[in-house]
Image: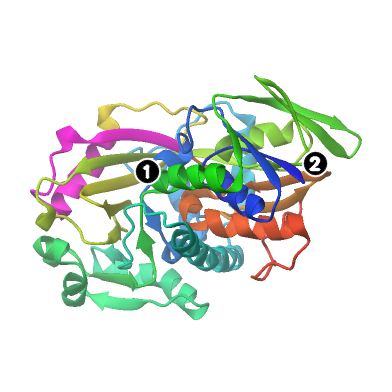
Amino acid sequence: MKITVLGAGVVGTAAAYYLAADGHEVTVIERHAAPARGTSQSNAGLVSPGDATAWASPAALKTFLRGLYNHDLGIKVRLRFDPYFLAWSLRFLRQCTVARLRANSQVKLRLALYSRDCINAISADTGIHYDERKKGILYFFRSQHSLDTGTDNYRYLAEHGLPIEIVGRDRLVELEPGLAGVKEKIAGGVYSPIDQTGDSRQFVEKLAAHAAEKLGVKFLYGTTVEGLDIEGDRVRAVMTSAGPVTGDAVVISMGPESGLLGRRYGIDLPVYPVKGYTATIPLEDESKGPTMGGADEDQLMAYSRLGNRLRLASTAEFTGFDRTYKPGDFATMFRTARDLFPGAFDEKKAELWAGLRPMMPGSVPVIGQARYKNLYLDTGHGHVGWTMACGSGKFLADLVAGRKPEIDTQGLVYGG
């Protein structure tokens, strides 16, 4: 078939790769001048099945409500008149039960584990490298109380297939010498040995180049999606700033904008943008930096080692489609990083960035056919899009081909 993919982030590019590998003629439409210039440009760098716990939970509900008035938290809610946000919030609140937390986390874990294998298979098959490190990820806690309560979700993931090790501070520093200087400030943590790290932008740029050169994928950069031309139960063409693009099928992978497009055509797609901040800093003294990825669970900051660079990421801010930032937005992030890795970097050399995560209320992405016979969704991956993108791309290609996917479809196939 001739298939048009909307979006050249990690999700759309992975989908295009797998669809083209199946022999389809694939065109990707991207508003930016190059791939991975939106949400996929900068993230924590973590490929992390260990972070598969859904956001919506009884504990998250309390934090979400506190975020309305306490903007020093990692979660910030900026009140504004936004009916879409209000509708999304109500659906999020309905997911904040223990039962929904467990169900959503199981689905995320299943896709994340599969996707990690897909990323590694792509790397092996294509020779693509992206400053990857396969040393695991540490999720650590600063107090005994937070350690005792915070490990519950990891233990649940372990019961459903995630290898983990609960570690005390001595073992933690043995695994990550970069944290030796703050050993006494950490109570312990969780080590997920199969987790890994890497630069998503590097990965997407190289995968897009491979897909174009080896598989014939056509990328239309600097081209804006303006709408869909629909007749009856089919999409006839994608209307763009460069004119109509016709084909046999369309895949929506537009990150946070997916919901805006979908609801124009009656598709129930509650994707909402959640802003996150990242800083990428060259390491002045590599011996003082981390050797693997990690997450300071009490300070809500994640980090990864990307070659000789340190990537920091934090904050979940509900502020609509605002992508702006100011230096003060990174103050807490830098303070935490200086505490963990003193002398490792000069924050004045940091490359600052803010982007929007496409969040679903239950943290589970939507994949599959939507309302029209030739329209498919592959979007809503939230804060672990880098982790789940390749698995969802391969999953989608199986659905398009009418093949049985390699993993259980329960909870993954779009039902809206």
| Residue pictured at 50% horizontal, 28% vertical | 32
Amino acid type at circle 2 is Asp
Estimate the x, y position of residue 387 in percent, counting from the top left: 47, 57
Query: Is residue 67 one of those drawn in magenta?
Result: no
Q: Which residue has dot 2 on it?
A: 248
Which numbered disc covers residue 315?
Answer: 1
Q: Quadrant of residue 165?
A: bottom left
Crowding at dot 2, Cα within 10 Å, few <14 / some 14-19 / many 20+, comes out as some
Query: Is residue 337 one of those drawn in magenta?
Result: yes
Q: Is residue 19 left or right of residue 329?
A: right
How far apart are the alpha carbons under marks 2 and 1? 40 Å
Amino acid type at circle 1 is Thr
Sequence-wise, the earlier of marks 2 and 1 is 2
Q: Quadrant of residue 123?
A: bottom left
Given residues 191 and 5, the one toward you in this image is 5
Secondary structure of the residue carrying tag 2 is: loop
| Residue pictured at 75% horizontal, 65% vertical | 403
Secondary structure of the residue carrying tag 1 is: strand
Q: Which residues are magenta?
A: 330-356
Q: Quadrant of residue 85?
A: top right
Report the residue that reaches farthest toward the front. Answer: 214
Estimate the x, y position of residue 334 in percent, counting from the top left: 21, 42
Relative height, residue 63 to residue 328 (above, below) = below
